[in-house]
Amino acid sequence: MNHAFVESEKMVSAVGTTSTDTSGNAYRVVLSDDFSNGYQTSKWGPAFGGGTYWNGAFTWSSADVGVRNGELQVTDTRHADGSWTAGGFSSFKAGNTITYGTVEFDARVEQAQGTQAAILMWPASDTWPRDGEIDILETPKTVPMHSTHWEGSDGSHRYDSIFSDYDPGQTHHYKMTWLPSVLTIEVDGKVVATWTDPAAIPDTAMGFGAMGYVAASGEEWLGGGPDGSTPNVVTTHIDNVVMSQWVSGSGTYTGGSGTVTKPPVVAEPAPKPADPVTKTIGSGSDTLVLKISQDAWQGNATYTISVDGKQVDGTLTAGASHAAGLNDVITVKGNWGAGAHKVTVNFTNDAYGGSSAADRNLHVDGITFNGVELAGSSADLYSNGPADFAFSKAAVVTPPPVAEPPVTTTPGTATPPAKFGGRDADVWIGQADFGGSDYVTYGGTSDWGTGPGATLKPASWNASWSSKLAFDNFVQTNLDLSKAGSLDFDLMLVSAKRGAVTLGAGDDQVTWVAHSNSGGAALNTMVIKTGAGNDTVTITDAGRSPLADYDRHDNGKLYNANYDGRHSIADVTFGSGQDSVTVEGKTKLVLHAGSGEATAVGGAGNDIFHAGTGTAEFTGGAGKDSFVFVRGSGHVVIEDFTSGTDLLQFSGGLTKSGVTTKAATEGGVSGLLVTYDTGGDSVFLAHVTKIAAADMLFA
């Protein structure tokens, strides 16, 4: 079926009109709408609004449902901060339902990567899957799909889907005929789906409605999430809806012409496991590290973490698959006094579909406190509720002062002892030139992606060691140089995909030449934490930087010499010094400014800048950038804020009522001064004369 239905004049079937089909079934119209009078809540109830969908990819917004151009439109909308909303409605919200009958309507579904429409019958009881669901039309990967859902005898969710071969991006006339012994869907008068199994045919009251849908990146059955090709607004067009109650007749129906080839009943498509999560929450000198995993089903597990009854941060979402042996690593920072304490993990969204394959669970796989593993620190959470773990902190005994030799600030020339996971034979160590300067270099000799990682974490620093170091061709590089005192480092991380760098108190330079062969935030993040010195961080990528010239040739099939940074994330935390970071290319910058003077220049990614307690000057660059402020943030200057593209985000209880704006001049540059709390905390938007309400987000 390749032809498109040509929309006729507006339907005028009045409520109460009766009709009889060719099989002798009589129907009475209970709802009719050609949308010439706008969106009527007496027919459809309120549009869905508020709340995040189970896949975490979008939230409901009533603004995504409305009558435009004489038709009902349901949209998926991408916003300036990159988030998505979608619309939805159902007649059962207004009490308009049928138990058996027909629904006819015209529809056209715009096609875009990572989105689909669902036009459906939903149970008035709102109990699923017990009371069923009829998907008259869904469009995964732009293919028309018709489905029915029910609860199996074992309590599990069962469904049956039938695919068609027409273009849902054209306007077609749809008809669902739902009777006790048969469920049929027709498109332009041709039967495309039929079910006769009594278990697959709902038998309770249902309402007609539709919803937009934005896929998460791991939903392979939908082709993954939106990308750069996806329009900012994707619309489903619906018109001429007539819903009729079956009142008498044979309860059988032969329908129009055409045949159906029906695949066997299949299990619910399992979402692809999310990438493992690495996250730090809280602040302080003490550290809890929790290893978390999940059994995902119809969405990822969510949970909270509390210490001594006080929740740290908000609700967290698990990513790592327990079955795959992976772990999220959640670092909880705090300042806890000497004595006994308790950390609590609270599982918040348990779900069970009647079998082990349809069961969402949360697992705590281990906890350390200040580097020491806690006894009994694992638990399997098979239902909502808390799991408590005890830990204690010993009292600090201050020893008498001991004279210590000063840490030298003059670097040596010897090679610090790095580790390579027992695969030293796959590493070359010597001198190499990067950017016209010699570095003590550790180079992976295996093809990129097949060799070991590199780790340098000395318990103390030997004055004879060089502080001018390069790590080349390692997928992962982890450096902890906090024991080196005020020694100045010059570090090159070339062709690294991920890792972590912690600096000391010197004036350091760090250059990351990012490389990647695949997506996933947790697998592509380089975490860089500066210290008390004046540090300079440069982020570039293997496709543009000559620093990667050693790696471009004969480096295996996983190396991409043209990589532009699109998967990479630089998570940079500044300290108390005069720190700066500059990004070249598409690497995303997530900056946490500190108590000193911060200068940050983003690249082409959608960057996030968190203001610190010191002063800061931010330049977002070409992407859709977000600038985050809390009460007590220091004064910030944004050099290139673009209204309608970039976003000011106010958190921690800041409200719209506390925001004022006025024209101002700073450093001879005119702009807009935005003050956002009673303490006078402010941000200056250079060259900006006004901003819109949509340029600000309060969370």
Image (tube, helix red, strand yellow):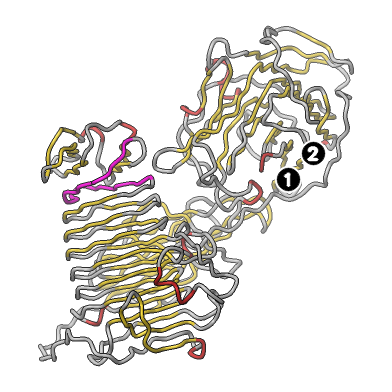
Camera-nearest residue between 213 and 661: 661
Q: Check residue 636 for magenta coloring.
A: yes
Determine the residue positioned at 42% across, 68% down: 290
Determine the residue positioned at 66% across, 16% down: 240
Q: Quadrant of residue 17?
A: top right
Numbered mark located on residue 318 in the image: none
**In the rendered view, does 121 fall on the left or right side of 698?**
right
Q: Check residue 301 for magenta coloring.
A: no
Q: Which residues are magenta?
A: 624-643
Determine the residue positioned at 58% across, 53% down: 218
The answer to whether marks 2 and 1 mark residues whose Cβ atoms lie closer than 8 Å is yes
Determine the residue positioned at 36% across, 66% down: 527
Badge 2 density bin: few <14, some 14–19, many ≥20, Cα 10 Å: some
Q: Position of residue 604 (x, y in %)?
A: 39, 51
- For residue 401, above or below residue 563: below
Residue on which the image places disc 2: 199
Q: Position of residue 359 (x, y in %)?
A: 62, 55
**In the rendered view, does 204 fall on the left or right side of 366?**
right
- For residue 505, above or below residue 220: below
